[in-house]
Amino acid sequence: MWTEEAGATAEAQESGIRNKSSSFSQIPVVGVVTEDDEAQGVFKPMDLNRVIKLLEETDKDGLEEKQLKFVKKLVQCYQNGLPLRDLAQIFKILNLCAGKIKNQPHFIESAYDIIKLCGLPFLKKKVSDEITYAEDTANSIALLGDLMKIPSSELRIQICKCIVDFYHAEPPKKHIPGYQQASSSYKIQMAEVGGLAKTMVQSMTLLENQLVEKLWVLKVLQHLSTSEVNCTIMMKAQAASGICTHLNDPDPSGQLLFRSSEILWNLLEKSSKEEVIQQLSNLECLLALKEVFKNLFMRGFSHYDRQLRNDILVITTIIAQNPEAPMIECGFTKDLILFATFNEVKSQNLLVKGLKLSNSYEDFELKKLLFNVIVILCKDLPTVQLLIDGQVILALFTYVKKPEKQKIIDWSAAQYEELQLHAIATLSSVAPLLIEEYMSCQGNARVLAFLEWCESEDPFFSHGNSFHGTGGRGNKFAQMRYSLRLLRAMVYLEDETVNKDLCEKGTIQQMIGIFKNIISKPNEKEEAIVLEIQSDILLILSGLCENHIQRKLQALIQLLIVFYHPVPGLLWKNNHNLAYWEPELNSKAMRKEIFGTEGVDIVLHVMKTDPRKLQSGLGYNVLLFSTLDSIWCCILGCYPSEDYFLEKEGIFLLLDLLALNQKKFCNLILGIMVEFCDNPKTAAHVNAWQGKKDQTAASLLIKLWRKEEKELGVKRDKNRKIIDTKKPLFTSFQEEQKIIPLPANCPSIAVMDVSENIRAKIYAILGKLDFENLPGLSAEDFVTLCIIHRYLDFKIQATHKQRELANKSWENFLARTSNAKTLKKAKRLQEKAIEASRHHKRPQNAIFHQTDIKGLNTTVPSGGVVTVESTPARLVGGPLADTDIALKKLPIRGGALQRVKAVKIVDTPKKSIPT
């Protein structure tokens, strides 16, 4: 090891050898130089422990100069890298130097030089050194963050440079025999383990008005935030909010905003997104983001500024997903709506005066991002008024029209097409919230006219480049797809004003026409898009015709007649009500008739689809669901449509689908069958159907019943007979189900059982077929049929038990009131039960209040309200004077209560006291 005396001796020996060699002739000497000897030439021997001991000494003359000299020699010794085995001692020396800076400023240079060494490669002598010295290395690197507290600009900048060098590792300047450079990622890993990111985030609070140092720290954090581990540490240190609030700090270079936005991006991507959003969802952060975005929007003209502006908008969009973020309170929502619509709707607002978007890529992306942020903002209902004030619906509808050849458009054809699709998609989210504005803009008429163009043969070459344009290259499918989505969203609001307007404009006929046109021109290339379009058309038709059943109209009229006719003098009122409601109900029922035979034809066309396509994954399943829904809503209840459906063998097609035995369709198909069986012509079609191997409809239904019971775990023997006669329909789920209290507005488990499983529907269908003369049944089928026949009896069975219990309770009550012995016996049993329910162990110092009223001859519990008769304040008496708690008079001068022989009852108003 290196010592001062050893150094002097070595110098003397070297001098003597040189003197001797000059007087003698040069004789070649062969020697062996080992790797250790060569390494010693690179790393001069030095006693680090002595340096530490020297730095720890105080109060000696000339000590500071000597300490500085030794530190300087140490720096010279390790110019080619830092061995891992020496790292802990070197950083201890660094820490001692840092501690002296306050009183001995000359040590700043020493600390600076040692920190500079940390940017050099870390060297290992053994492969295992990285693991052996991992803890020392992590603690040493963590010390760099702590040193940021020293109020020295040069020192802080050097620390930042050193950390940045971790990510730009360079090989050693000189190869050192016996040593290897540690892996390039070793420093980065040790920085993660040591928690360097936390101290660097905390150092930001020390640099409020020091721009240069702040930019260096942000550069460090930008590098550190490329790691998920560091991002998590930074997130916990509140880095997101700390950085965001300083986005508007003055910075001529522009680095602060760029690096800050990059760090925020990394935090959102690589740590807990929800936690980062929560940190940014405060007024201070959003005000900073708002001002930055406004400045970049209004004054940013370079490619870099526009790109940064879009990044800030994306971050804002992510924050806006949090409903607790005060977007409205800070005024950001209002500004965003203005920026999204100022091109389409003229505004006198000074923020957009003279502004115009170009067709550059950045401005095009901005427009799409603004449409997207509107979709996010409209989920917060208080935003609705701002959307109305900003005329968002009108602005979006400027895109719902066919391209105009004569007009010069600022956007290219591909850009305009993409914005058009994005605007229609945005309308699907916004328009349902703004029905009045949608109707005032003639929304239905605009969409239907646009759909008419989509269906036309006008030449149009779409690019189909965007997400919304998928499947629309060279055709108008994308435009049709999103327009139908918009209509579907409006129809399913069930707003009668909207739906009536659609029907008056011929929507039902137009939808059927579009469907038939698509069928006539099959497009296998875009099959998935075509199937989605067909599904949406059927859903729109279902929504327009839903709940407008002719049977319900007639039933309502009959109910009104029955209700009003027995009451004298209300015949006029009855006629008045019918006259008022019947036209409207008839107009609604007319929608099913408009659907008519053409509508039934498209439904039958879909039902004839090859069943193998249901497993293709292209969307045939969804189309079939939509078709079944349209049968329920558009055909059932309209007698001409029902008859035409039966005539075209629609029941056969339904039973063919049922025979596929796909559980997801069974419930809906059976529900449709139940409704169809109200039509007297249906039974003949059901009995006439034959499936594979001559299977009949009754046999199919009974087979489905058995399968359902097997899945539900109903107990049956090998011959399908009842095992548990007390619970013949009980499922294994019901046996395991515990008693769960449900609110009054929730259906009970028993009701859900009837609605969710198919047994009740099968019972209803077979019941309408009279359970007799059913063809094609086996002996096992007849056994199951007997159980089905008694289904309803087995389900009321619980009601019979309840009635029996109620009757028994009434008989007991009559016995108590008519027989004194029975009453006394019941009273004793009641008192015994009450006593058994009490806690016999009383807490210490507890006061026991007697709640029993002795002498009462009643076994009926009191209700929630007890009526008592008030007495004058000077008396305590009443009807119970003859009982053991005979009313007593309280002496004026105190003392014990005394019995009162006579009590005068004063009539006073009765009071109801809740117990």
Image (cartoon, rainbow, N blue to C red):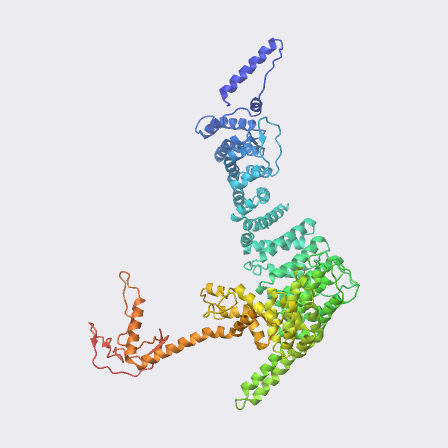
| Image spot of residue 114 (x, y percent) | 54, 32
Instruction: Report whether 704 appears left or right of 907.
Output: right
Would you place residue 292 above or below residue 753 in this image? Answer: above
| Image spot of residue 220 (x, y percent) | 58, 42
Q: Residue at x 61, y 15 (%)?
A: 30
Would you place residue 138 above or below residue 525 in this image? Answer: above
Is residue 463 or residue 788 the one in the foreground?
788
Instruction: Report whether 204 appears left or right of 650.
Output: left
| Image spot of residue 6 (x, y percent) | 50, 19
Instruction: Report whether 115 appears left or right of 883.
Output: right
- Furthest residue toward bottom: 568
Would you place residue 570 above or below residue 304 in this image? Answer: below
- The quarter of the image holding the C terminus is bottom left
- Residue 588, by quadrant, is bottom right
Kindly tell me whether residue 248 is visible in this rendering: no
Kindly tell me whether residue 235 is visible in this rendering: yes
Is residue 489 or residue 371 the one in the foreground?
489
Instruction: Report whether 61 appears left or right of 785.
Output: left
| Image spot of residue 242 (x, y percent) | 54, 49
Would you place residue 371 above or below residue 673 in this image? Answer: above
- Residue 802, by quadrant, is bottom left
- Residue 530, by quadrant, is bottom right
- Furthest residue toward front: 779
Is residue 1 or residue 794 the one in the foreground?
794
Q: How many marks?
A: 0
Is residue 218 or residue 844 the one in the foreground?
844
Q: Residue at x 40, y 77 (%)?
A: 806
